[in-house]
Amino acid sequence: VKPLKLAMIGDFPRSTKEIAGGVESVMLYLTRDLSRCSEFEIDVVTIDRWNLGDRLIESDGFKVHYLAQSPLRGPAWRLHNIHRMRSYIKGLAPDIAHVHVAGLCSDAVRKTGIPWVLTLHGVRFLEAQLLRGPGDRSYRRWLITREEQRGVREAPILISISPFIEE
């Protein structure tokens, strides 16, 4: 039986020994556990947030594809990263994609034609209200809210990790 090609898309730690947040830890532990099942062939796709550039690391029975961030600024940064991720994911040709957090990653996957599910780890539109600075309070809050709404609306399957998220 041929294994199911699964692409895990979202924030992934720089290394398995340097976990910087909840999404990173969920992605790492879930990917590590799923990779122990012979039914899956797993590729993780993430944007490199440490400016170390494109790289491929094989770890614990799965591959992690770090894509260098766009050098562009503002909205062009986001669009370039979405386009680059989308092309890369399509090239991997997974059977299904598991996206973590609505936004950049869900926007990259949603027009690929690849079946996908979305796990919501937090409520980004509420977190955006805590942003400081005039640009943060207006444009970024609007963008984050719009991204999250689009991801939730268009995801074929939603996974909620807590009752708070469900509400």
Image (cartoon, rainbow, N blue to C red):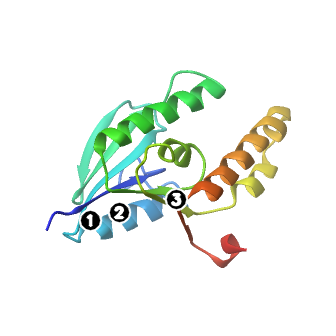
- Say left or right for 154 vs 27: right
- Say left or right for 38 vs 151: left
Q: Which mark is residue 142?
A: none
Q: Residue furthest front?
A: 113
Q: Which mark is residue 31?
A: 2
- Say left or right for 59 vs 114: left
The image shows residue 133, relative to residue 76, as above or below, that is below
Of callouts 3 and 1, the N-terminal one: 3
How far apart, in angstroms, are the residues tagged by discs 3 and 1?
Answer: 18 Å
Location of the C terminus by quadrant is bottom right
Which element is circle 3 on? helix
The image shows residue 112, relative to residue 124, as above or below, that is above
**Amino acid, disc 2:** Thr
Label 2 crowd bin: few (<14), some (14–19), many (20+), radius 10 Å: many
Marks 1 & 2, CB-CB < 8 Å contact = yes
Which element is circle 2 on? helix
**Amino acid, disc 1:** Ser
Q: Position of residue 143 (x, y in %)?
A: 72, 41
Residue marked by disc 1: 35
Residue marked by disc 3: 23
How far apart, in angstroms, are the residues tagged by discs 1 and 2?
Answer: 6 Å
Marks 2 & 3, CB-CB < 8 Å contact = no
Label 1 crowd bin: few (<14), some (14–19), many (20+), radius 10 Å: many
Q: Position of residue 13 (x, y in %)?
A: 42, 51
**Amino acid, disc 3:** Val
Which element is circle 1 on? helix
